[in-house]
Amino acid sequence: MGVLKKFEQRLEGLVNGTFAKVFKSEVQPVEIAGALQRECDNNATIWNRDRTVVPNDFIVELSTPDFERLSPYSGQLGDELAGMVRDYAKQQRYTFMGPIKVHLEKADDLDTGLYRVRSRTLASSASQASGAGGPAAAGPGAPPAGRPGGYGYPPATPGGAPPMPAAPPPGGRPSGYGYPQPAGGQRPPAAPPSGGRTRYWIEINGTRHQISRATLVMGRSTEADVRIDDPGVSRRHCEIRTGTPSTIQDLGSTNGIVVDGQHTTRATLRDGSRIVVGSTTVIYRQAEG
């Protein structure tokens, strides 16, 4: 069962159905949950071959009507959303630098039904005290460590500890329905870490997604390995199979795939191959570790 489906089922049993009445607003919890998943995917930073770090502190900005409707339940909803992020991270093999927190805030410039998600990576005080510099286990209730600056600032490096992984590109970016991610300001993708074997990954709008299994499904569904929020992309659009050589296979999508300028249903991939799905360009990458 998918993470979002489990999240919906948990909400159904809360407060004797109170949530079901409250959430007849324009913004639905499952939409916020999906946006948090995308925020993790879009800001995933590969630290080494075993660890991919994602943000752990999120702010969901809501319009005044939606915020007033949901704010009485913000604590419980925040806990449920944090649990969903934790489940999704486990599924994707992501790790965190500290405890997961999800907060709701009012934004006067948003109309009913629109929202924005901002995120940052905050290290817990426990991980700083240990001096290990590694991702800490995320636990509910532990406060994030105090930090200079606001959203988008990387965590400070503890004295004597190895360098922390680079924080994702600056947070505070608009996202959610009606607010596309800005194209500028992202760091260029770093080379994959060495590991003595071939490494595979894809790049979408400057964001790198590691291929850690033999297959990777791209699509609009939250059940896809890499979700592409593009109306021209089918729920399960295509599948990449890594190997010698790597290949891509269309999964019966509506609009098909274009690989290196050619419409096709199946193609061999090489490092740098350009894959077009809907209006989104995906760059396939591979390198010897």
Image (spheres, rainbow, N blue to C red):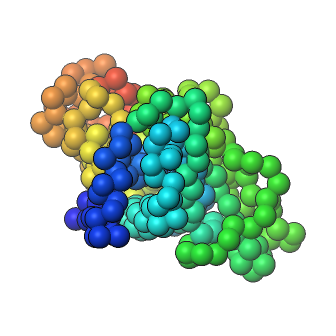
* 91 w.r.t. 119: above or below: below
Going 55% across and 52% down the picture, which residue do you hit? 104
Going 63% across and 66% down the picture, which residue do you hit? 97
The N terminus: image quadrant: bottom left
Front residue of this view, candidates 139 and 132: 139
Image position, residue 141 (x, y; %): 60, 75
Going 59% across and 33% down the picture, which residue do you hit? 108
Residue 70 in the figure: left or right of residue 163? left
Residue 169 in the figure: left or right of residue 235? right
Image position, residue 39 (x, y; %): 49, 47
Residue 180 in the figure: left or right of residue 265? right
Check the image and name the residue furthest to the right.
159
* 281 w.r.t. 137: above or below: above
Front residue of this view, candidates 41 and 209: 41
Image position, residue 221 (x, y; %): 27, 45
Image position, residue 158 (x, y; %): 82, 68
